[in-house]
Amino acid sequence: MHIHHRPLAAAVLLLLASGSALAQTAASERPAVSQAAQQLDARIVDWRRDLHAHPELSNREQRTAAKVAEHLRTLGLRPRTDIAHHGVVAIIKGGKPGPRIALRADMDALPVTEATGLAFASRVTTDYNGRQVGVMHACGHDAHTSILMGVAEALVGMREQLPGEVMLIFQPAEEGAPAGEEGGASLMLAEGLFKDFKPEAVFGLHVFSSIPVGQIGVRQGPLMAASDKFNIKVIGRQTHGSRPWGGIDPIVAAADLVGSAQTIVSRRSDLAKQPAVLTFGMFNGGVRYNIIPDDVELEGTIRTFDADMRKKIFADLENVSEHIAAAHGARVETHIPSTDGNPATINDPALTARMLPSLQAVVGADNVIEPPLQMGAEDFSLYAQQVPGMFFFVGATSAGIDPATAPSNHSPQFLLDEQALDVGFRALLQVALDYLDQPSADRAS
């Protein structure tokens, strides 16, 4: 997805209007952030390369979690390691009173066979849905984990002067738990992540191939779409391919359904309000060229930003499925949606506007851009439903490569410019320190 580089003019105006102390003073990077970056840069790169060479799929992050927990223990922290299977959570208590915040990084990799040619490229393979596949950090979660490990060390190093408390969330299964399992942010919250520690704000980041290294992308309000999976089974009646009139052809009915369903977004959804996507990603039916099968199974995804539009598309797809099938003499079994999806990732407008100078302090005002709405999804959204949240993108594509055509996140050729590790580390640390140092009146305004 191409990112259009549009400055955050609206956010700047809001900050100037607010007259907050932060808007007036956070014009340059904190010396403590610069010093920590110099001290930890090489280690963060080493951690990332180690994790990249040893990726683990969702709900299988045993080695990664052990590495994270070991590092936190060396810092004198007492991590909890039994949340949502392999999640790791620790609290840094500052030496001064202050607010509570949470910082989140995800740890899982994808069933993708790496094709980057890196010296530390993954050679890991595993069984996934009955198939032998490669495993790769094709979305950059190795970078996120390493960045937060570095931020943890930096914050512990200045703990005596630190106001407030910081929760470190190393989350498994952001890419989605395997079939029949639970995981990710939803399970962490269900198991009481915020029960005894309710932060005032939660922050997260994501390296992003559509932005050049050295830039940060953030926007107020909706940022990433809600994501829902659906399953539709079209049931006909098997017959010989030479005698289609002897049965009910579910392939023809399913093909008609797929075509008609495209009008749900193009003709039934108010796209002037928010964008939406309905995609069929699987069409599975039949075992032989001359046999019309009994049934066809369809799976796909729905992406939306508006809650009412989301519900309407569910209902419209149900309606189209039932009536198209009936028109062919077939019937359907539908699961729309088939699992609990992720809601839209929405950045709290006031929080995002207030923390904008922190991001600008790290990379400069001209290098903080406003990306368009992203149809990809993130379960960080679930944390941001509980407390005000801000999620931002860190440019990952090297200079000289067009971000519009660079291999995207989830590609076997996804290639992270490791300067993004430094930018992400400094941005997340600066955001944390600036928020913790704000007077309570400014945080609440």
Image (spheres, rainbow, N blue to C red):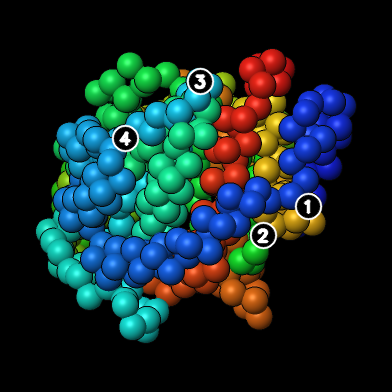
Instruction: Please state if 426 lies on the left or on the right of 54 as rendered.
Output: right
Mark 3 or 1, which is nearer the eye? 3
- Where residue 31 appears, as percent x and y from the top left, is 64, 52
**Residue for badge 2:** 215
Instruction: Please state if 46 lies on the left or on the right of 307 as rendered.
Output: left
- Where residue 384 appears, as percent x and y from the top left, is 50, 28
Q: Kindly identify which numbered label has been placed on residue 97.
A: 3
Mark 2 or 3, which is nearer the eye? 3
Instruction: Identify residue type, mark 3.
Output: Pro
Evaluate whether residue 222 shows in this view: no
Instruction: Identify residue type, mark 1.
Output: Ala
Q: Residue at x 66, y 80 (%)?
A: 400
Marks 2 & 4, CB-CB < 8 Å contact: no
Instruction: Identify residue type, mark 4.
Output: Ala
Q: In the structure shown, which secondary structural element does the residue marked by tag 2 occupy?
A: loop
**Residue for badge 4:** 90
